Amino acid sequence: MALRWQLHPAGFADHPSAPHRPTAQTGGFRLQILSSCFVGSVALGRQLHMSKAARATRQKPKKKRMKTHYGPKKLKSGYWQQDVDIDDDIDIFEWFNAEELREDPPVTVKDLTEVAKFTVYPESEPQAYDAPEYRPAPLKLQLAKGLKNPPPLDQCLGRSFTADIQSQMGEFGSGFSMEKVDIIISFQALTTLLGFVDGTMTEDMRAKGLHTHKGTEPERIDLFRVGRLPDAPNAISIGTVWNWVPENAQAGSANFNKRSYDVNFQQIATGRETIGGPPSIREVDDPSHYRILSYTLGDLNVLVRTPVACTMPTIDDSCMPNSGMAVECSTANERDAGDLWGQNLASKFAEMRLGNVGMLVRGIVDKGSLIDVQELTQDDLKLDRASVEEEADSLTGRVAGLLKRVKDVAECPGCVDRILYLQYCDGEMRVISPWSDEELAELENFRDVTDKEVEELVFGPEP
């Protein structure tokens, strides 16, 4: 019979709560026989009992490896170790970054005049201008999402920006002379350059993974076609060949495919009926309204073609800085109602001045219901933030400095007879020209009236 010896003080067993067991006293302690099987542990120090299987599978702590190398780590990847011939198919004449434009002096928009206005209906030629006036939308209105199309490209297959400007100015320009014009540009291209100088475009491209990172080359994105007009011998034209839309900033030609309340809200603000039906067929073939503005940015005379959704009401038009100013309509979620007054307010104010926009209208939506409408003019924004005008002039000065640099490069002897593009690559704008036979063969499908002599030189005269 196995015995377990347990030593207790003599007075411990005399406690009233202690069970009665037969004991044998030895000196000042009692010997207590508990059972015939050995269980438990010694009361003076408990020990943890583990099975052999658990003891065998227990992991022993790993020994720390002694450090033997103290030098710098070997570089595993980087753009300097990748394809060094990535730009062998183009000629790079100059490149610009946003940091070098910070020292340019501020510039404000001056001498703004409207030289032409017209309306383009789907699959038809430009016609007389008939943009509607803005009408306030009623609250508690249930909006429906519609397919929001991306802005149309200025230069694409079957479309030439310079040829369009030449024909539109000839038909609706009422005798305006372009001999003293320095820059001919679209409003979409102007806002893209504004996004480049204020850093929002660079940050968006970096977030989309289009910059240089580990094991990946930067994407080269041709943004603008740089051309010339026969009617404007001293000017260069800048038209978009790829639109920068933050929600669609992909290297390839991805579908826009975005449903938004903006489409329905703009219809209501212009006096039209709301859209209905299944979401897949909520496409609206509305006409597009355009104006061609002329103003000065520092030393540059700029001609801008800008789209117009609707104009200021007649009753408020006399209170605006310019006559016939545009109204920009958009929607925002209730949680984003205050985002307009964020860090990009100066950029939005600069856009309003560059596009002759008199008022911003934002419909605040909660679960499709219109709960509020924000109507803000340029004077309202200046009252909300006193420094917004100064900040906007600083951004406009950077855009003017970038345009002047591009114009100086395009007028160099080596660039006069070349097909030029303004390309975005790794946070920089580059003036480039393709020279490979494959690239030039593809450009034959993008005929431009200003590059006729270059095409005849490269491809020979047309039969």
Image (cartoon, rainbow, N blue to C red):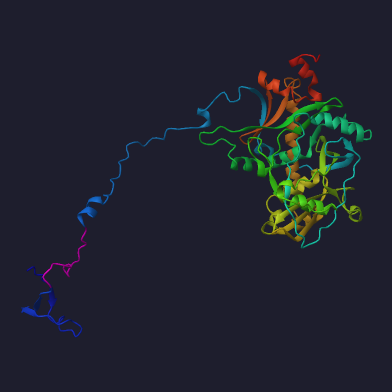
Q: Is residue 36 magenta?
A: yes
- Is residue 196 visible to the viewer in this orientation of the structure? yes
Which residue is painted at 78% across and 22% down in the image? Answer: 451
Residues drawn in magenta: 35-50
Pinpoint residue 164: horizontal percent, then vertical percent. 83, 31
Q: Main secondary structure of the magenta part?
A: loop
User: Residue at the location (71% across, 38% down)?
Assistant: 243
Q: From what the image shows, is residue 142 above or below residue 190? A: below
Give residue 394's quadrant in the image.
top right
Which quadrant of the structure image shows residue 54?
bottom left
Q: Is residue 238 above or below residue 112?
A: above
Image point 91% across, 56% down: which residue? 315
What residue appears at the point 61 percent right and 25 percent down from the top-left corner? 87
**Magenta highlight on residue 265:** no
- 295 or 219, which lies in front? 219
Q: Foreground: 72 or 7?
A: 7
List x then y, in percent, for residue 89: 63, 22
Left or right: residue 28 versus residue 250 is left
Q: Position of residue 356 (x, y in %)?
A: 83, 45
Image quadrant containing the N terminus: bottom left
Residue nearest the observer in this picture, 27 or 19: 19
